[in-house]
């Protein structure tokens, strides 16, 4: 035996697997004098509904479970512990409706019948239907459905030879009433289906099987009846239910609607708030799916993390809310006078009571943003006060024909198709009420046409070339009809293209209207995926309205909630915005020493590891790359001209070693401005002094050799002037620097360290230790000082030996660079340290390249005639001593590469190359030394010699070695 759990509201009870019939052809109905039990063998999802006064007979059948008996006003449950014999299959049915005093319906006979659920009569204070009828939402909508059916029946292209009928019922906008009336659609269907198999007849034998239902109006009603229609596979198309809940096809698989979901309407309302920059709003909704789901969607979209719209207060009203309840809501709103916008998702009767309370409380100069329930209706704004209203309504085309049809109606005589019209006629004084037409009328007509187009496709598919309905469409398959409804596309009254999504929703578009007490409704704009305002004057007026409840806070301010709300705040600045962040917008917290507040002051973040700016990086890198490129070009040029006198006389080994040092200096400049890593730091610490030592050691040995040659009286006493000897000394000096740098790396391994030059950032740099500053730097400074001293010492030793002067110029420039940049390097921190080092190495390398190698390149490229071997003949003055004359005479026997006017001595070929080289070097030293001592100017002799030979090779006074 099963024990079933259920909820009692004395009107509707949903019980899963209430009973399971052993045999028979469902659906099965069990009736008592107080309750109606419905089950379906296929679904096993029974529904228990209250239907008093119906009595039927029973037959044998076994059922085990829970028996429910339901009385109006109270519920009883009896658990059956034994088999109860009930009749589930009809053999003979005799029914009476003694408990039903009234069964009013609008009837149009037809081959296929559509049901209609409309809110026709008003409800009284006890939530009961009274005799007064609703004009716009009631009679007009009923007539819209009747009009659509008549138009379809007259159309020979749509459902030809098939008459569409109607069975229209009144819901009074009550759940119980809607369920009772919906059940009658099902009873008709069940009775007619049973009558084809049984001999008995029951209920309204003049009606046909209801194949689908147009309605209901409110979402709360559509939700309830949609559950019932799903069990019996009856398609339903609503013309006004907009709750997002109805988009769930698992629960409401047979539901569709010609109006869009409120999720789009909530988004449209939020876009209006955003457009006019209203920061805070109130919300009021009616209880039930329509109001609750609409406001819920609005709040979800308006979360602070999305758009920062504050919902200051959110209120809900019910059908039981009194005038005092509405006045209390207005009083609560008045506590926040700076919030002037109210979002409304309310039923029309609730709207009227709210506006009445607002008028009584003098709640003026506000902006009401209302859903389509308000729309452009005139009956709602009866109590509207001095405020602005922005209402949303669904678009529709002009219903000229229907309006003419409606105004020509006459209620003098009863009409079977609209039994309520006579009461409407009496209410309006035996005439048509002078009122505007309801904005949902086009959607009622489109709902009827959606059924008609789907039935037409079904008819053409199942009954081709036949007159009237065929057996294939008797009865109509509800599932197939639903599927065809979702696929229809036609030109409707609400839109030029009516169609449905897979979830049964139609496309979303809204027309926005602005309403004031004196200007009435004026179109403000449209919304379809985005807001498009078309009335500039109204837009400008609304932009001047401010709605906010918050102070304008800085990010570094903590917020203190105002009394009575959760999202309205006043601001208090943190004491130290540079070092504090705001925790949960309520408390100022200090950051760590190496941290700072993040951009929105919601927490701390590590200070950024700043590097050299892109401007400096690009500038130094480009300059160093160009320098390295020119160094390679100079090296290639000298290698190509390595056998020329100019290159030979420049100590070829030292000159190429010097070029290597220049190239490494440029490379080190690039290394200095790169992002610090362990490898980069190792290269910086070793290469900084190493590259400089190569340059200055080479220059020191070179200038020392020249100085010793020119300052020694006895040439034979000059030692260590040969190339390999010079290289040994250079490598020894370089080895000292390499040893110092290596020891420094071993003692203090390279690593990246961070410093805080400012409170805004951290700079990553390499860990240059004291050892580098105490050894490598002084060592290179010593080499520079020695080079400078030697070049200064021999600056006037001869006017023809320009290389010594060039070396002196290099060293003077180097001293200036070091004196200028080293204090900057030690006096700054952060990114300027590597920048000064990069500038120092780049400028030093450039000075050497330009001053020392520039003249050589100039002669090789632009004065090649100067780069040839000549005779060392000179003109000796009479005042020259015999020793000087002898030396000069000896110089005439020196044979280098002969010119065109000279002949090579015969005996020169008898000497070995080694002897020739030694003799050449010795004679060169002797010549240079004695030329200086004799104060002879070779340029004068050269000019005289060129004049004697009538050549024009040398046009200027440039000097070469």
Image (cartoon, rainbow, N blue to C red):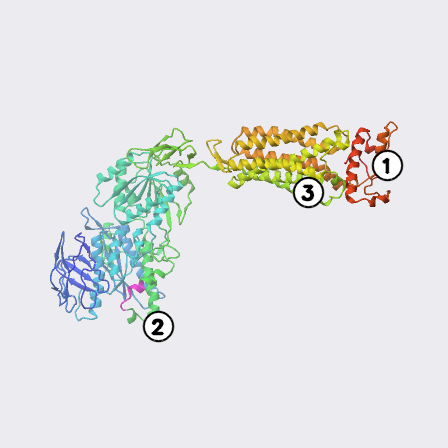
Circles 3 and 2: CB atoms closer than 8 Å: no
Q: Is residue 898 visible?
A: yes
For label 1, the SS is helix
For label 3, the SS is helix
Estimate how packed mark 1 is, as few (under 14), some (14 to 19) or many (20 or more) residues with alpha carbons within 10 Å. Answer: some
Choose the circle earlier in sequence order: 2 or 1: 2
Residue at the far front: name it. 717
Residue under pointer 3: 635
Q: As drawn, is 493 to the left or to the right of 9?
A: right
Choose the circle earlier in sequence order: 3 or 1: 3
User: Residue 182: horizontal and vertical position, in percent?
Assistant: 23, 58
Residue under pointer 1: 945
As drawn, 667 above or below 131: above
Q: Which of 326 and 641 is in front in this view?
A: 641
Label of residue 465 in the image: 2
Q: What stretch is highlighted in magenta?
A: 474-481
As drawn, 174 above or below 185: above
Q: Which of 6 and 254 is in front in this view?
A: 6
Residue sitting at x 68%, y 36%: 850
Choose the circle earlier in sequence order: 3 or 2: 2
Q: Is residue 377 visible?
A: no
Residue sitting at x 27%, y 65%: 110
Residue at the far bottom: name it. 465
Estimate how packed mark 2 is, as few (under 14), some (14 to 19) or many (20 or more) residues with alpha carbons within 10 Å. Answer: few
């Amino acid at each position: 035996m099963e024990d079933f759990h259920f909820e009692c509201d004395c009107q509707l009870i949903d019980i899963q697997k209430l009973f399971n019939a052993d045999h028979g052809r469902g659906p099965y109905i069990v009736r008592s004098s107080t309750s109606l039990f419905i089950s379906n063998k296929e679904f096993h999802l029974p529904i228990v509904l209250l239907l008093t006064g119906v009595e039927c007979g029973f037959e044998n059948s076994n059922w085990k479970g829970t028996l429910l008996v339901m009385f109006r006003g109270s519920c009883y449950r009896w658990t059956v512990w034994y088999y109860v014999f009930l009749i589930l299959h009809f053999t003979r049915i005799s029914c009476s409706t003694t408990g039903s005093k009234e069964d009013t319906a609008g009837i149009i006979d037809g081959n296929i019948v559509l049901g209609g659920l409309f809110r026709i009569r008003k409800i009284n204070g006890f939530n009961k239907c009274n005799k007064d009828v609703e004009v716009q939402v009631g009679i007009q909508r009923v007539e819209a459905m009747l009009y659509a059916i008549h138009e379809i029946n007259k159309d020979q292209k749509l459902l030809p030879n098939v008459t569409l009928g109607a069975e229209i019922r009144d819901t009074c906008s009550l759940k119980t009433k809607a369920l009772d009336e919906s059940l009658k659609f099902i009873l008709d269907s069940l009775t007619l289906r049973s009558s084809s198999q049984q001999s008995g007849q029951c209920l309204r034998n003049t009606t046909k099987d209801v194949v689908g239902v147009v309605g209901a109006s409110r979402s709360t009603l559509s939700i309830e009846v949609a559950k019932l229609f799903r069990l019996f596979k009856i398609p339903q198309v609503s013309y006004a239910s907009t709750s997002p809940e109805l988009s769930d096809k698992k629960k409401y698989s047979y539901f569709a609607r010609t109006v869009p979901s409120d999720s789009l309407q909530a988004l449209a309302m939020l876009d209006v708030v955003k457009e006019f920059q209203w920061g805070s709003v109130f919300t009021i909704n009616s209880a039930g799916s329509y109001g609750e789901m609409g406001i819920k969607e609005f709040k979800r979209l308006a979360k602070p993390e999305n758009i920062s719209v504050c919902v200051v207060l959110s209120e809900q009203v019910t059908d039981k809310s009194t005038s005092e309840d509405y006045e209390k809501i207005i009083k609560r709103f008045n506590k926040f006078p700076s919030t002037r916008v109210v979002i409304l998702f309310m039923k029309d009767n609730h709207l009227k009571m709210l506006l009445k309370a607002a008028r009584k409380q003098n709640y003026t100069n506000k902006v009401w943003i209302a859903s389509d329930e308000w729309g452009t209706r005139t009956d709602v704004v009866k109590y509207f006060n001095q405020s602005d209203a922005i209402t949303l309504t669904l678009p529709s085309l002009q219903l000229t024909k229907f309006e003419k049809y409606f105004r020509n109606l006459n209620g003098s005589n009863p009409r079977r198709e609209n039994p309520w019209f006579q009461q409407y006629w009496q209410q309006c004084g035996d005439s048509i009420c002078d009122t505007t037409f309801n904005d949902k009328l086009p959607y009622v007509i489109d709902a009827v046409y959606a059924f008609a187009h789907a039935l037409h496709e079904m008819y053409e598919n199942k009954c081709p070339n036949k007159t009237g309905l065929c057996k294939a469409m008797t009865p109509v398959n509800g599932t197939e009809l639903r599927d065809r409804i979702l696929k229809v596309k036609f030109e409707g009254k609400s839109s030029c293209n009516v169609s449905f999504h897979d979830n049964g929703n139609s496309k979303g578009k809204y027309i926005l209207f602005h309403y004031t007490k004196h200007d009435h409704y004026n179109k403000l704009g449209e919304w379809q995926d985005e807001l498009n305002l078309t009335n500039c004057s109204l837009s400008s007026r609304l932009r001047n309205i401010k709605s906010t409840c918050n102070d304008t806070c800085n990010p570094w301010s903590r917020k203190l909630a105002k009394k009575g709300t959760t999202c309205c705040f006043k601001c208090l600045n943190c004491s130290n915005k540079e070092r504090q962040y705001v925790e949960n917008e309520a408390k100022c917290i200090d950051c760590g020493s190496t941290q700072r507040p993040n951009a929105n002051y919601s927490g701390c973040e590590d200070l950024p590891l700043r590097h050299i700016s892109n401007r400096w990086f690009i500038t130094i890198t480009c300059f160093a790359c160009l320098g390295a490129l020119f160094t390679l070009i100079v090296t290639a040029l000298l290698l190509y001209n390595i056998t020329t006198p100019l290159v030979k006389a420049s100590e070829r080994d030292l000159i190429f070693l010097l070029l290597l040092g220049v190239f490494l200096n440029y490379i080190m400049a690039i290394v200095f401005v790169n992002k610090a890593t362990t490898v980069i730091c190792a290269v910086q610490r070793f290469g900084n002094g190493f590259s400089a030592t190569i340059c200055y050691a080479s220059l020191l040995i070179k200038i020392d050799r020249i100085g010793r040659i020119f300052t020694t009286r006895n040439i034979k006493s000059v030692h260590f002037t040969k190339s390999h000897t010079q290289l040994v000394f250079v490598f020894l000096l370089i080895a000292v620097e390499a040893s110092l740098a290596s020891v420094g790396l071993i003692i203090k391994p390279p690593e990246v360290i961070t410093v805080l030059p400012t409170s805004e950032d951290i700079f990553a740099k390499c860990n240059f230790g004291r050892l580098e500053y105490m050894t490598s730097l002084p060592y290179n400074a010593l080499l520079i000082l020695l080079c400078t001293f030697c070049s200064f010492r021999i600056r006037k030793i001869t006017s023809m030996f320009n290389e010594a002067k060039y070396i002196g110029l290099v060293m003077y420039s180097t001293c200036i660079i070091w004196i200028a940049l080293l204090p900057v390097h030690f006096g700054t921190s952060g990114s300027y340290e590597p920048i000064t080092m990069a500038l120092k190495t780049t400028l030093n390398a450039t000075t050497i390249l330009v001053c020392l190698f520039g003249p050589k390149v100039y002669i090789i490229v632009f004065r090649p005639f100067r780069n040839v071997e000549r005779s060392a003949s000179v003109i000796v003055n009479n005042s020259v001593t015999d020793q000087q004359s002898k030396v000069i005479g000896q110089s005439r026997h020196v044979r280098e590469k002969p010119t065109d006017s000279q002949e090579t001595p015969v005996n020169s070929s008898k000497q070995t190359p080694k002897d020739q080289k030694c003799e050449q070097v010795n004679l060169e030293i002797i010549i240079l030394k004695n030329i200086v001592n004799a104060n002879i100017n070779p340029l004068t002799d050269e000019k005289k010699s060129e004049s004697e030979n009538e050549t024009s090779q040398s046009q200027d006074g440039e000097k070469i070695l």
